[in-house]
Image (cartoon, rainbow, N blue to C red):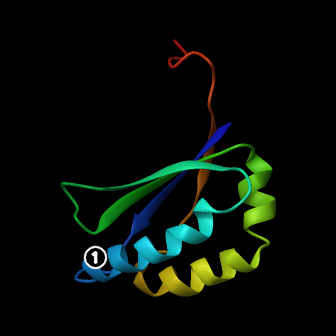
């Protein structure tokens, strides 16, 4: 399993609209093959900054299958107007041990 972690920088003043749009758009991901769970967390110090964390079954579930899907196009169309910066996802392996050290 892997974690997709995506910092999201939202246009200031559009946070509530973004959260409403996200609640609709996340259903596109929740029903997709390989999706496990997600969290959207908001930064306390910078309220226009969020982190989206999605657990996928495999890297390809996100980077190949979801990104090539019609659902991804709708996702982008729905959420892109709120981004102050283009999001960049990173992926992390989930190991059996919670700590590497």
> Residue 27: x and y, percent?
54, 69
> Element under label 1?
helix
In the image, farthest residue toward the left? 45
Q: Is residue 83 left or right of residue 89?
A: left
Which residue is rendered at x = 73% and y = 68% of the image? 67
Quick check: 68 above or below 49?
Answer: below
Image quadrant assignment for residue 2? top right
In the image, farthest residue toward the top? 101
Q: How many marks?
A: 1
Which residue is rendered at x = 60% and y = 71% of the image? 28
| In the foreground, 91 or 33 | 33
Which residue is rendered at x = 62% and y = 18% of the image? 96
> Residue 54: x and y, percent?
55, 51
Q: Is residue 17 left or right of residue 84?
A: left
> Residue 50: x and y, percent?
36, 60
Q: Is residue 100 left or right of residue 32?
A: left
In the image, farthest residue toward the front? 31
Which residue is rendered at x = 51% and y = 75% of the image? 25
- Disc 1 marks which residue? 15
Count residues near mark 1 (Cα–Cα under 10 Å), then give few for <14, some for 14-19, many for 20+.
some
Quadrant into which the N terminus falls: top right
Quick check: 76 above or below 96?
Answer: below
> Residue 71: x and y, percent?
68, 76
């Amino acid at each position: 399993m892997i974690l997709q972690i995506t910092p999201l920088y939202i246009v200031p003043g559009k946070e509530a609209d973004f959260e409403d749009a996200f609640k609709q758009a996340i259903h596109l991901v929740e029903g997709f093959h390989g999706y496990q769970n997600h969290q959207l967390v908001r930064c306390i110090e910078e309220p226009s900054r969020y982190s989206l964390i999605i657990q996928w079954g495999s890297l390809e579930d996100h980077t190949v299958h979801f990104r090539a899907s019609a659902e991804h196009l709708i996702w982008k169309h729905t959420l892109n107007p709120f981004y102050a910066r283009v999001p960049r996802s990173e992926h992390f392996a989930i190991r059996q041990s919670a700590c590497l050290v």
